[in-house]
Amino acid sequence: MGFDDGCNTGLVLGLGFTATAESSTPSKAAKRPCLKFEQSTTAAAVEPSLTLGLFGETYKKVNNIDVNKAGSGGEFSDHQLYRQPSPHSHSAVSSFSSGRVKREKDLSSEETEVERVSSRISDEDDDGVRKKLRLTKEQSALLEESFKQHSTLNPKQKQALARQLNLRPRQVEVWFQNRRARTKLKQTEVDCEFLKKCCETLTDENRRLQKELQELKALKLAQPFYMHMPAATLTMCPSCERIGTGAGADGTSKIPFSMAPKPHCFNPFTNPSAAC
DNA sequence: CCGGTCAACTCGCAGC
DNA sequence: GCTGCGAGTTGACCGG
């Protein structure tokens, strides 16, 4: 598995470097090129770190229950941390947007029933203005925990989690979708950063090899004596190929100075002089 | 005020 | 055709 399998960046390094960076990018994701080269992400970990919501976050008054109003000095009990079902929400769901109607039709009967019980809580107030749902710290933590175990949910898991969080299954589903997207984006950024470093290293390597080539050419010009010697006598080190033969023993032409199989900088076990 | 974050949306595609 | 998912977008909210 090459690096490009995980991140279809369109970059081709072309020196046979085999990166071992893990990427769980599904095949479908290959459509999207790398982005945000300017962003610097030095984290080597594949799994991104997410900050959980803080208790200090202010939540809007939802369904007549002040949820987590830390800013105003309001006290809350554990059960208040979870948003409560809205008594009028099913109509609100459909009125949220025109496309939402289609979604609602898509819901299975089981899910629809849960929708009725634990319906949209935050989307609109009485003025029809969309309110943003903020998950509580506990909800986020539980979702994160669940995501660590499996990044996708089957319907049963979704239902169970939704019940546990007092959210609608749809909300859980959306959260997981967004979470996967964030993970992928983070991974893409890490991949891009990695490729950038690869590119820099290979550029250096290329520069070094060019220089070496120039030096060897100069040496060849300065000492034409080599040209008259049998090829076998020119061999210095068969493994490092620092000085290759201009022609084989049979006189067939070969590339004068072949590039080392692997860039020295990437393989700590490649010691050109080890075999000398 | 502006940019970042994130829940929630639409759309298109793939798998069944 | 249905369903689930990814990609891209929207809009509320928040902090600097």
Image (spheres, coloured by chain):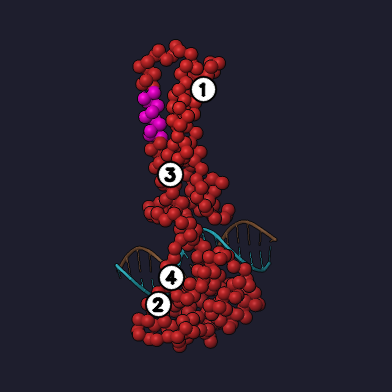
Chain colours: A red, B brown, C cyan
In the image shown, does B11 or A255 lie closer to the viewer? A255
Q: Earlier in the sequence, mark 3 or mark 1?
A: 3
Which chain hosts label 4?
A
What amino acid does circle 3 point to?
Cys
Q: Quadrant of residue B5?
A: bottom left
Q: Which residue is mark 1?
A: A254
What amino acid does circle 1 point to?
Lys
Look at 42% across and 50% down and name the residue there. A193
Residue A185 showing in the rendered view: no
Which chain hosts label 2?
A
From the top left corner, tell me how far across and down residue A201 is, in percent: 40, 41
What amino acid does circle 2 point to?
Phe
Q: In this rendering, is residue A246 above or below A159?
A: above
From the top left corner, tell me how far across and down residue A219 is, in percent: 37, 20
Q: Which residue is mark 2?
A: A55
> How far is the residue under mark 3 from the one under mark 1?
29 Å
In the image shown, does A242 or A222 lie closer to the viewer? A242
Residue A197 showing in the rendered view: yes
From the top left corner, tell me how far across and down residue A6 is, in percent: 53, 51
Q: Which residue is mark 4?
A: A52
Stretch of the chain drawn in magenta: A206-216
Q: Quadrant of residue A104?
A: bottom right
Q: Earlier in the sequence, mark 1 or mark 4?
A: 4
Which mark, by number, is residue A198? 3
What amino acid does circle 4 point to?
Leu
> How far is the residue under mark 4 from the one under mark 2?
9 Å
Q: CB of mark 3 within 8 Å of CB of mark 1?
A: no
